[in-house]
Amino acid sequence: MKFSTRELVLLTVFGTLWGLVEISLGSVLHVLKVPMSGALLAAVGLAIALIGRLFVPRRGSTFYIGVVALVLKLFSIGSVVVGPMIGILFEAAIAEIVLTLFGRPQRVSFMTAAALGVLWTLVQPFFTGMLLFSRDIFVIWLDMLDSGSRLLGLDQSAGIWIILVLVAVYMAIGAASGWLAWGSGRLLQNRLDGTSLLLTGPAS
């Protein structure tokens, strides 16, 4: 689907914001070793992309924003960018698919799109670990159980419960991101519309 020049500018702005968040906030979270930093980073990035979807409510707009963010991520210095780039691409693609299936933008579609997009960060190590780093799937599984065990304070023997809680937490983070994106985006739209009306005056 073709976008107008104005739409392309808007999408590029939101994509740039997502990319800058990945570069700046991503580096800070990595250095501080914040738990679930991937989920938090995805939640912020997807919130930006979803707000962009409100301003350009057309099929493909969310994915375009993700592609712009991915390209900007290429300019990260001193960090491994392949994994994060794959994450951005899949997060944007998942959100795009969900929003397309729902049709007209609405709060529930934003919450679902963000929830599934953030959940991808939990699943991604199984794909990137095996395909890019030739890691054994069993080792990846043990690493996930170990990190989940330390994060939740549960014994690794409760493996299924650890995974279920992690899935619930990741999706809750995403759903909250989608909920905030919908509210913030609508508020921003209303304020911009009000400002535009003040500058141009009421239509005659």
Image: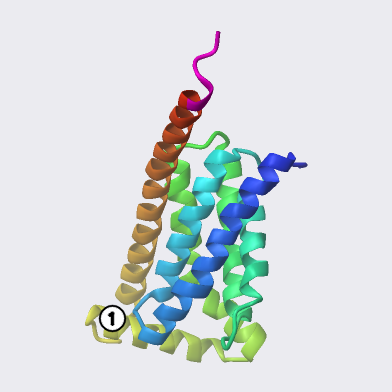
Q: Which residue is depicted at the point 54% across and 60% down?
A: 17
Q: Position of residue 160 (x, y in %)?
A: 34, 75
Q: Is residue 3 left or right of residue 184?
A: right
Identify the image quadrant of the C terminus: top right
Q: Amino acid at mark 1?
A: Leu
Q: Is residue 202 magenta?
A: yes
Q: Quadrant of residue 174?
A: bottom left
Location of residue 16 with respect to 55 vertically, above or below: below
Q: Position of residue 19 (x, y in %)?
A: 57, 66
Q: Which residue is depicted at the point 48% across and 30% down?
A: 193
Q: Which residue is depicted at the point 60% across and 50% down?
A: 62
Q: Is residue 173 magenta?
A: no
Can residue 157 be seen from the camera position used here?
A: no
Q: Residue 160 or 121: which is nearer the viewer?
A: 121
Q: Which residues are magenta?
A: 199-204
Identify the image quadrant of the N terminus: top right
Can residue 49 be seen from the camera position used here?
A: yes
Q: Which residue is depicted at the point 49% across and 70% down?
A: 121
